[in-house]
Image: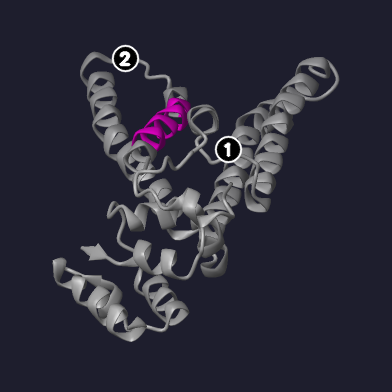
Protein backbone atom coordinates (compact mmCIF):
# COMPACT_ATOMS: atom_id res chain seq x y z
CA UNK A 1 0.00 0.00 0.00
CA UNK A 2 2.75 2.40 0.96
CA UNK A 3 4.43 1.99 -2.41
CA UNK A 4 1.47 3.38 -4.29
CA UNK A 5 1.63 7.18 -4.23
CA UNK A 6 -2.05 7.47 -5.02
CA UNK A 7 -2.81 5.78 -1.73
CA UNK A 8 -0.53 8.11 0.13
CA UNK A 9 -1.53 11.58 -0.95
CA UNK A 10 -4.03 12.38 1.74
CA UNK A 11 -2.78 15.16 3.95
CA UNK A 12 -4.71 13.73 6.88
CA UNK A 13 -3.38 10.23 6.76
CA UNK A 14 -2.92 8.69 10.19
CA UNK A 15 0.64 8.62 11.42
CA UNK A 16 0.29 5.28 13.21
CA UNK A 17 2.36 5.98 16.28
CA UNK A 18 2.46 2.80 18.37
CA UNK A 19 0.20 4.07 21.17
CA UNK A 20 0.41 0.91 23.27
CA UNK A 21 4.20 0.90 23.20
CA UNK A 22 4.33 4.59 23.93
CA UNK A 23 2.05 4.24 26.95
CA UNK A 24 3.70 1.08 28.30
CA UNK A 25 7.36 1.84 27.66
CA UNK A 26 7.65 5.50 26.65
CA UNK A 27 9.26 4.70 23.30
CA UNK A 28 8.26 3.72 19.77
CA UNK A 29 8.73 0.00 20.12
CA UNK A 30 11.33 -2.49 18.91
CA UNK A 31 10.54 -2.21 15.18
CA UNK A 32 13.71 -0.25 14.43
CA UNK A 33 17.24 -1.51 15.22
CA UNK A 34 17.79 1.28 17.77
CA UNK A 35 14.39 0.52 19.32
CA UNK A 36 15.26 -3.16 19.61
CA UNK A 37 18.64 -2.38 21.17
CA UNK A 38 17.14 -0.01 23.73
CA UNK A 39 14.33 -2.44 24.57
CA UNK A 40 16.68 -5.39 25.06
CA UNK A 41 19.36 -3.53 27.01
CA UNK A 42 16.99 -1.63 29.29
CA UNK A 43 15.15 -4.85 30.11
CA UNK A 44 18.47 -6.57 30.84
CA UNK A 45 19.28 -3.74 33.27
CA UNK A 46 15.89 -4.07 34.99
CA UNK A 47 16.30 -7.84 35.12
CA UNK A 48 19.75 -7.37 36.67
CA UNK A 49 18.17 -5.38 39.53
CA UNK A 50 15.70 -8.20 40.21
CA UNK A 51 18.42 -10.86 40.02
CA UNK A 52 20.65 -8.86 42.33
CA UNK A 53 17.90 -8.41 44.93
CA UNK A 54 16.95 -12.08 44.78
CA UNK A 55 20.59 -13.11 45.21
CA UNK A 56 20.97 -10.75 48.15
CA UNK A 57 17.87 -12.25 49.77
CA UNK A 58 19.09 -15.81 49.19
CA UNK A 59 22.64 -15.12 50.37
CA UNK A 60 21.76 -12.87 53.30
CA UNK A 61 23.24 -15.33 55.78
CA UNK A 62 26.38 -15.86 53.73
CA UNK A 63 27.60 -12.39 52.82
CA UNK A 64 28.30 -9.61 55.37
CA UNK A 65 25.41 -7.24 55.96
CA UNK A 66 27.54 -4.16 55.18
CA UNK A 67 28.31 -5.49 51.70
CA UNK A 68 24.71 -6.57 51.12
CA UNK A 69 23.46 -3.09 52.09
CA UNK A 70 25.99 -1.43 49.79
CA UNK A 71 25.06 -3.64 46.82
CA UNK A 72 21.34 -3.13 47.48
CA UNK A 73 21.89 0.61 47.68
CA UNK A 74 23.86 1.14 44.49
CA UNK A 75 22.39 -1.50 42.16
CA UNK A 76 19.21 0.41 41.17
CA UNK A 77 21.19 3.60 40.64
CA UNK A 78 23.78 1.90 38.47
CA UNK A 79 21.12 0.06 36.48
CA UNK A 80 19.11 3.20 35.84
CA UNK A 81 22.25 5.13 34.95
CA UNK A 82 22.85 2.48 32.28
CA UNK A 83 19.21 2.75 31.12
CA UNK A 84 19.59 6.54 30.93
CA UNK A 85 22.76 6.10 28.86
CA UNK A 86 20.99 3.69 26.51
CA UNK A 87 18.02 6.07 26.31
CA UNK A 88 20.39 8.84 25.27
CA UNK A 89 21.79 6.60 22.51
CA UNK A 90 18.28 5.59 21.48
CA UNK A 91 17.04 9.18 21.25
CA UNK A 92 20.16 10.22 19.33
CA UNK A 93 19.44 7.54 16.73
CA UNK A 94 15.82 8.62 16.19
CA UNK A 95 14.75 10.80 13.32
CA UNK A 96 14.17 14.46 14.13
CA UNK A 97 10.40 14.41 14.71
CA UNK A 98 10.54 11.34 16.96
CA UNK A 99 13.49 12.85 18.82
CA UNK A 100 11.78 16.20 19.34
CA UNK A 101 8.72 14.36 20.68
CA UNK A 102 10.90 12.52 23.19
CA UNK A 103 12.55 15.77 24.26
CA UNK A 104 9.19 17.46 24.68
CA UNK A 105 7.89 14.56 26.79
CA UNK A 106 11.01 14.72 28.97
CA UNK A 107 10.66 18.49 29.32
CA UNK A 108 7.01 18.28 30.36
CA UNK A 109 7.82 15.51 32.82
CA UNK A 110 10.58 17.60 34.36
CA UNK A 111 8.27 20.61 34.64
CA UNK A 112 5.68 18.44 36.41
CA UNK A 113 8.24 16.77 38.67
CA UNK A 114 9.81 20.01 39.83
CA UNK A 115 6.80 21.40 41.76
CA UNK A 116 5.95 17.91 43.07
CA UNK A 117 9.50 17.49 44.40
CA UNK A 118 9.45 20.94 45.93
CA UNK A 119 6.05 20.28 47.51
CA UNK A 120 7.16 16.95 48.97
CA UNK A 121 10.38 18.51 50.19
CA UNK A 122 8.46 21.37 51.79
CA UNK A 123 5.98 19.02 53.45
CA UNK A 124 8.84 16.85 54.68
CA UNK A 125 10.61 19.89 56.09
CA UNK A 126 7.55 21.47 57.69
CA UNK A 127 5.89 18.35 59.08
CA UNK A 128 8.94 16.11 59.44
CA UNK A 129 7.45 13.67 56.97
CA UNK A 130 9.60 10.87 55.69
CA UNK A 131 9.36 11.24 51.94
CA UNK A 132 9.79 8.01 50.03
CA UNK A 133 11.99 9.01 47.11
CA UNK A 134 10.90 5.99 45.08
CA UNK A 135 8.02 8.19 43.88
CA UNK A 136 10.65 9.27 41.38
CA UNK A 137 10.06 5.99 39.52
CA UNK A 138 6.58 7.31 38.66
CA UNK A 139 8.27 9.83 36.37
CA UNK A 140 8.76 7.15 33.74
CA UNK A 141 5.03 6.40 33.32
CA UNK A 142 4.43 10.16 33.44
CA UNK A 143 6.92 10.64 30.60
CA UNK A 144 5.14 7.90 28.65
CA UNK A 145 1.78 9.65 29.09
CA UNK A 146 3.28 12.96 27.97
CA UNK A 147 4.81 11.23 24.94
CA UNK A 148 1.39 9.80 24.11
CA UNK A 149 -0.21 13.24 24.23
CA UNK A 150 2.61 14.74 22.15
CA UNK A 151 2.26 11.94 19.58
CA UNK A 152 -1.49 12.67 19.29
CA UNK A 153 -0.57 16.06 17.85
CA UNK A 154 0.99 14.35 14.84
CA UNK A 155 -1.78 11.84 14.18
CA UNK B 1 4.82 27.81 7.62
CA UNK B 2 3.43 26.29 4.44
CA UNK B 3 5.15 23.93 2.07
CA UNK B 4 4.74 22.26 -1.27
CA UNK B 5 6.11 18.92 -0.25
CA UNK B 6 2.95 16.99 -1.00
CA UNK B 7 2.69 18.51 -4.49
CA UNK B 8 6.33 17.74 -5.25
CA UNK B 9 6.06 14.22 -3.90
CA UNK B 10 3.00 13.55 -6.04
CA UNK B 11 4.73 14.93 -9.12
CA UNK B 12 7.65 12.57 -8.53
CA UNK B 13 5.32 9.64 -7.90
CA UNK B 14 6.69 8.94 -4.47
CA UNK B 15 4.83 7.56 -1.50
CA UNK B 16 5.41 9.06 1.92
CA UNK B 17 7.34 5.93 2.88
CA UNK B 18 9.56 6.11 -0.20
CA UNK B 19 10.31 9.79 0.33
CA UNK B 20 11.00 9.13 4.01
CA UNK B 21 13.47 6.41 3.08
CA UNK B 22 15.27 8.68 0.60
CA UNK B 23 15.56 11.39 3.25
CA UNK B 24 16.45 9.05 6.12
CA UNK B 25 13.49 10.02 8.28
CA UNK B 26 10.29 8.31 9.38
CA UNK B 27 7.09 8.38 7.36
CA UNK B 28 5.45 10.16 10.27
CA UNK B 29 7.91 13.02 9.81
CA UNK B 30 6.95 13.40 6.15
CA UNK B 31 3.28 13.28 7.07
CA UNK B 32 3.74 15.86 9.82
CA UNK B 33 5.63 18.21 7.47
CA UNK B 34 3.03 17.85 4.72
CA UNK B 35 0.17 18.57 7.09
CA UNK B 36 1.98 21.62 8.46
CA UNK B 37 2.17 20.22 11.97
CA UNK B 38 5.94 20.08 12.03
CA UNK B 39 8.57 22.38 10.58
CA UNK B 40 11.66 20.45 9.48
CA UNK B 41 15.15 21.29 10.64
CA UNK B 42 17.34 23.28 8.27
CA UNK B 43 19.45 20.21 7.31
CA UNK B 44 16.30 18.26 6.45
CA UNK B 45 14.87 21.20 4.52
CA UNK B 46 18.12 21.35 2.51
CA UNK B 47 17.92 17.60 1.85
CA UNK B 48 14.34 17.95 0.63
CA UNK B 49 15.26 20.88 -1.59
CA UNK B 50 18.26 19.02 -3.04
CA UNK B 51 16.21 15.89 -3.64
CA UNK B 52 13.59 17.75 -5.67
CA UNK B 53 16.06 20.14 -7.31
CA UNK B 54 14.54 23.32 -5.91
CA UNK B 55 15.62 26.06 -3.58
CA UNK B 56 14.36 25.89 -0.01
CA UNK B 57 12.29 29.04 -0.40
CA UNK B 58 10.55 27.51 -3.41
CA UNK B 59 9.30 24.65 -1.23
CA UNK B 60 8.85 26.27 2.17
CA UNK B 61 7.41 29.68 2.82
CA UNK B 62 5.98 31.56 5.75
CA UNK B 63 2.91 32.58 3.78
CA UNK B 64 0.83 31.17 0.97
CA UNK B 65 3.19 32.73 -1.55
CA UNK B 66 4.48 29.22 -2.16
CA UNK B 67 1.72 28.98 -4.74
CA UNK B 68 4.34 30.56 -7.01
CA UNK B 69 6.02 27.17 -7.18
CA UNK B 70 2.97 25.57 -8.72
CA UNK B 71 2.92 28.21 -11.41
CA UNK B 72 6.62 27.74 -12.05
CA UNK B 73 6.21 23.96 -12.24
CA UNK B 74 3.30 24.31 -14.60
CA UNK B 75 5.28 26.67 -16.82
CA UNK B 76 8.13 24.14 -16.91
CA UNK B 77 5.73 21.32 -17.75
CA UNK B 78 3.99 23.43 -20.40
Q: Is residue B32 above or below residue A122?
A: below
Label 1 crowding class (10 Å Cα cut-off): few <14, some 14-19, many 20+? few
Spatial CA span between label 1 and label 2? 24 Å
Q: Residue at x 42, y 19 (%)?
A: A132
| Image position of A62 (left or right of B36) | right
Seen in the picture, residue B70 relative to A135 is either above or below; the reply is: below
Q: Nearer the viewer, residue A61 or B60?
A: B60
Q: Is residue B33 magenta?
A: no
Subunit of mark 1? Answer: A
Closer-to-camera residue (B78/B55): B78
Which residues fall within the magenta stretch?
Answer: A137-149
Name the residue tied to disc 1. Answer: A77
Tell me whether circle 1 and circle 2 mark residues in contact (CB < 8 Å). no
The spot of residue A86 in percent (x, y) is: 61, 50
Q: Is residue A138 left or right of residue A109?
A: right
The residue positioned farthest toward the right in the image shown: A62
Q: In what element is the residue under mark 1?
A: helix
Q: Is residue A138 magenta?
A: yes
Picture residue at 69% right of the left edge, 37% below the top: A45
Q: Principal SS element in the magenta part?
A: helix
Question: Relative to A88, is B70 on the left or the right?
Answer: left
For disc 2, the chain is A
Local packing at callout 2 (Cα closer than 10 Å; few below 14, some 14-19, many 20+) is few
| Residue B69 in the image, given as x and y percentages of width and height | 25, 77
From this view, report whether residue A66 is shown above or below residue A100: above
x, y percentage for residue B74? 29, 78
For disc 2, the marked residue is: A129
Q: Residue at x 43, y 66 (%)?
A: B9
Amino acid sequence: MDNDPSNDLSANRNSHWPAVWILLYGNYGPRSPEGRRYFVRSNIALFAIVVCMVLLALLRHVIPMSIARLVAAITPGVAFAYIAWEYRRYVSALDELARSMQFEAVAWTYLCALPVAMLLGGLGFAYHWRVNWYWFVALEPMRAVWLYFVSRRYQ
Amino acid sequence: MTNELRVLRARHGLSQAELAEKLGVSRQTINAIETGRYDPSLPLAFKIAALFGHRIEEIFSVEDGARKLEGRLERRAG
